[in-house]
Every structure is written in structure tokens, then in C-alpha cells.
Amino acid sequence: MNMTNPIKNNCGCLRCFRRLRISVELLATLAKTLSVSVEELMEEPSVKTATKRGPTSLLHKQIEQVGLMPRAKQKFISEMLEALIKQQQSA
């Protein structure tokens, strides 16, 4: 598995993001947090990969719920996630 770009290794997560109607601002924040471009988040995988079987993870369910929220709440949650990720990376 190529760990240099984990976002490309998780196609299931990418499909989840593509199904959501999220703001461009949130996409930009996600791309920055994941250290990828917005284009990389939106591009289709070129090779069919095996998908994880089983129930949807709690994180995926939560991301779907965030996508249904008003843009202001999406932005707030995105900022909180970014702050937590930065805090974890510096620890």
C-alpha cells in the first residue's frame, strides 16, 4: 500500500465525499487538511479497487450527516476537525 498519499488509497471514502453535497469551501478545507488538491478529491479512481465489505463506519455516517447540515455548521465542524488534526500532529 502506498502510504505517501493515503487519500488515494481509500476509494470508499472518496466515493462518500462525492455523493455528498458539500460546499466548495469545505472541499478546500478538506483538501488542505488531507494535503491533497481539490482535484484529487474529486477525481475518479482509474482502477477498480475492492471495496470494504460490511456496515458503513461511524465516521462515514457522521460525514454524511455533516453534508446534510447548513453550510455554516459544515464550516464550523470542518474548522474543529482541522484544529484537532493539527493538535494531534503536533503531539
Image (cartoon, rainbow, N blue to C red):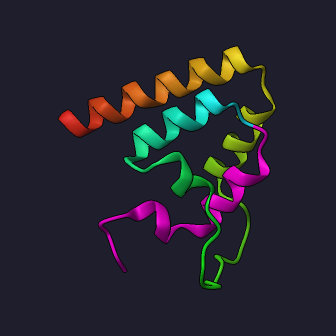
Q: Does any portion of residue 91 appear in the rendered image? A: no
* Image coordinates for residue 17, horizontal then vertical, percent: 67, 50
Query: Which residue appears at 53% of the width and 67% of the height?
Result: 10
Q: Quadrant of the N terminus?
A: bottom left
Q: Where the C terminus falls, by quadrant?
A: top left
Rendering coords of residue 24 (x, y %): 65, 32
Horizontal side of residue 19 vs 5, given as left or right: right
Is residue 13 one of those drawn in magenta?
yes
Q: Is residue 17 above or below residue 56?
A: above
Write the start and end of the magenta stretch as one range.
1-21
Which residue is nearer to you in this view: 8 or 1? 8
In screen coordinates, is 45 left or right of 19? left
> What percent of the width, then of the height, locates residue 44?
65, 68
Query: Is 82 within the magenta?
Result: no
The x and y percentages for residue 45 are: 60, 73
Q: Look at 61% across and 83% down and name the residue there.
A: 49
